[in-house]
Image (cartoon, rainbow, N blue to C red):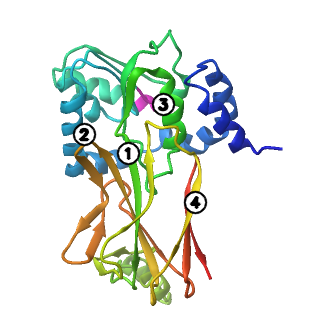
């Protein structure tokens, strides 16, 4: 008996050839959408971080200028309208943008009106799964553009969403950005920016908070020395191929390795959006979309397994 993820993958792989399968995919995949539905109802604090990320804005500015002119564009995830604005500045033939968060749609509509962009666009308060052909759009889209990257790269089920969205593309259409990469760096113990817990100490002076102060989970980490000269590629996913919705790989670790840092790249042509920043020879730090992941090992491990599925990403220590 095949599990639900395997069944879903088989169905979604056939959506491009048989778009009617989308209704079945929506029903079977509803459990995944429910898990991220809280994002649609949450505050827009995460939007502030995205807007303040200059690297992200420059990446999408270059990509839209190069690819969107005179194209029919579908944007998945309107947000508060910044990417929509960049697309419209590139003079597309048309833009349809969808978002399940009604607050985002209202804010984006007002933002675009205030910035005097052409009215050659349509904002839809719908998940991309709920877009219907031909009521909402025709299956002749040139570009599906997205920035569906959560804190761990896979947390917004973006692979599942983009595989489903291929049903809207014309024969030469494509997903943008088209390449997603995951790298890792074996590390020694990082130096930590210790957070201040003076506020709780003032109320409960008897507390010993050293556990929090020493935890990577509770603190931000600084650049640190890694044991390999270069980051190691774990997964490279071509979003315009028949990519896998789950995979895993095992790597041997160098001696004295105490943990791994994970970072992500989104690539389109010569343009790269990355969570990695170089801070000198063999020193790195993470920020931007996801701000990187650091996992400290609980024991001395000789190998590590990296896995992803339609919903999540995991790191497992192996003896």
Graded by Cα atoms within 10 Å as few (under 14), some (14 to 19) or many (20 or more), the crowding at tag 1 reads some
Nearer to me, 254 or 168: 254
Q: CA distance from mark 1 to mark 4?
A: 18 Å
Q: CA distance from mark 2 to mark 1?
A: 14 Å
Q: Which residue is mark 2?
A: 60
Nearer to me, 229 or 201: 229
**Most extreme residue toward the right, as rendered?**
1
Kindly indicate whether the residue at mark 4 contacts the one at mark 1 (C-beta within 8 angstroms). no
Determine the secondary structure under disc 4. strand
* Picture residue at 60% right of the left edge, 33% below the top: 13
Decide whether residue 36 is among the magenta residues. no
Instruction: Identify the mark at residue 179; answer none if there is no mark.
Output: 1
Q: Which quadrant would residue 160 be assigned to in this image?
A: top right
**Quadrant of image for the N terminus:** top right
Instruction: Identify the mark at residue 248; answer none if there is no mark.
Output: 4
* Residue 236 visible in the displayed image: yes
The region drawn magenta spans 98-103
Residue 234 rendering spot, x and y as whole percentages: 45, 62
């Amino acid at each position: 008996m095949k599990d639900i993820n395997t069944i879903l993958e088989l169905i979604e792989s056939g959506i491009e050839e048989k778009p009617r399968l989308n209704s079945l995919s929506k029903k079977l995949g509803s459990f995944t959408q429910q898990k991220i539905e809280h994002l649609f109802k949450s505050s827009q604090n995460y939007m502030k971080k995205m807007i303040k990320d200059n690297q992200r804005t420059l990446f999408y500015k270059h990509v839209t200028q190069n690819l969107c002119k005179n194209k029919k564009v579908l944007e998945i995830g309107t947000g508060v309208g910044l990417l929509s604005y960049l697309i419209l500045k590139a003079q597309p033939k048309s833009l349809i943008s969808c978002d399940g968060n009604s607050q985002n749609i209202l804010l984006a509509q007002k933002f675009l009106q205030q910035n005097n962009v052409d009215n050659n666009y349509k904002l839809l308060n719908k998940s991309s799964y709920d877009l219907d052909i031909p009521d909402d759009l025709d299956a002749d889209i040139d570009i599906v553009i997205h920035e569906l990257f959560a804190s761990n790269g896979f947390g917004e089920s973006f692979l599942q969403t983009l595989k489903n969205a291929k049903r809207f593309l014309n024969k030469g259409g494509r997903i943008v950005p088209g390449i997603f990469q995951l790298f890792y760096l074996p590390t020694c113990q990082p130096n930590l920016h210790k957070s201040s817990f003076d506020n709780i100490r003032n109320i409960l002076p008897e507390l010993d908070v050293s556990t929090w102060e020493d935890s990577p989970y509770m603190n931000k980490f600084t650049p640190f020395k890694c044991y390999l000269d270069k980051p190691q590629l774990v997964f490279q996913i071509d979003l315009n191929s028949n990519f896998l919705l789950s995979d895993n790989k095992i790597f041997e670790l160098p001696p004295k390795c105490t943990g791994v840092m994970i970072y992500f790249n989104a690539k389109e042509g010569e343009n790269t959006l990355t969570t990695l920043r170089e801070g000198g020879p063999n020193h790195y730090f993470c920020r931007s979309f996801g701000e990187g992941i650091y996992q400290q090992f609980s024991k001395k491990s000789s190998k590590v397994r990296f896995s992803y599925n339609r919903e999540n990403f995991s790191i497992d220590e192996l003896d």
